Image (cartoon, helix red, strand yellow):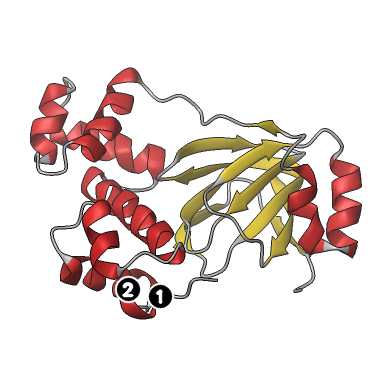
Amino acid sequence: MTPAYETRHDARETLPVHRHAMGYAALVLDGGYEEVCADGRFACGPGTLVIHPAWHTHGDEFGCGGAVVLNLPDIAADSLSVIRISNPQSLEKLAREHPGLAAEAVREEAETVAPIAPARWLVKLTRLLCECPDVAVDKIAEQCGVSPEHAARACKSWFGFGPVQLRKEKRLQLAIKLLRDGANPAVAALEAGFSDQPHLTRLLKRATGHTPARFPTS
C-alpha cells in the first residue's frame, strides 16, 4: 500500500480539471476548497474526506486560507463519496499509519456531504442533458429559459465542463464503471448512451489511454 502523503495549497489556488488513473481519498486537515466535477460542486472543509473512484475527473478551487490535505492513494471506490468525519484527528492518525484501512473505517458512520445546490434552471439543464441524449444543447438551454452562451458559462463554472463536455463525461463515467464491473464493451457502450462501440473507444482512449477491450478492472 502506498503511504499517505500531505499536500499544501496556496490561498485562491486553482487546480484545473484533471483525471487520476487510480482511486484515492483526500482528507482535508486545514483550510478548505470547493471541488468541481460532473457530480456537482462540493464544499470541502476540515474533516471532509473525498473518496474518488479511478479515472474520476475533477478540479479544485481553494479558499482564502488555502488548504492542507492528506492524500490516501490506492483506494477502491465505485463512485465519488464526500463525507464529513466526526473524529478527523483519529482518522488522520489511522491514515498515516494504515492508509488502506482509513477510508473503509469511516464509510458507515460518517455524514454524507451533499453537493452545493445550483440554480434550479441548471439542475434542470443537467438532468435533461442526461435524459435527452439526442437533443441539442441549444434546445435544452431554451427549455431552461437561458441562452446557450449563458448555459455554457454557468455549466463550465459550476461543474468544470461545458454542457457538451459534461454530457460526454457523464456517459464516460458510466461506461468506465460498467467496464470495471466486467461488462462487455458493446454492452457498456450501449448502456452508457454512446452511438456505438467505436465512439466509446475513441473517447475512452483519449481520456485514459485504454481501449474498452483492455480496460483495467482493478
Q: Are marks 1 and 2 in contact (CB under 8 Å)?
A: yes
Q: Residues within 10 Å of mark 2 (few under 14, many from 20)?
A: many
The front one of 179 and 30 is 179
Quadrant for the C terminus in the image: bottom right
Q: Which mark is residue 215?
A: 1
Q: How many marks?
A: 2
Q: Amino acid at mark 1?
A: Phe
Q: Please, is residue 120 above or below residue 54 in the view? A: above
The front one of 101 and 3 is 101
Q: Please, is residue 130 above or below residue 118 in the view? A: below
Please state the horizontal and vertical placement of residue 150, each as a whole percent of the image: 21, 32
Q: Please, is residue 136 above or below residue 203 in the view? A: above
Please state the horizontal and vertical placement of residue 66, each as a whole percent of the image: 68, 46
The front one of 7 and 211 is 211
The front one of 170 and 41 is 170
Q: Is residue 133 left or right of residue 205?
A: left
Quadrant for the N terminus in the image: bottom right
Please state the horizontal and vertical placement of residue 117, each as a whole percent of the image: 46, 24
Q: Amino acid at mark 2?
A: Pro
Residue at image point 84% right, 41% down: 88
Q: Is residue 45 left or right of residue 158?
A: right
Question: Pointer 2: what residue?
Answer: 212
**Rendered image quadrant of residue 177:** bottom left
Q: Please, is residue 90 above or below residue 138 in the view? A: below
- Can residue 65 be seen here? The reply is no
Q: Residues within 10 Å of mark 1 (few under 14, many from 20)?
A: some
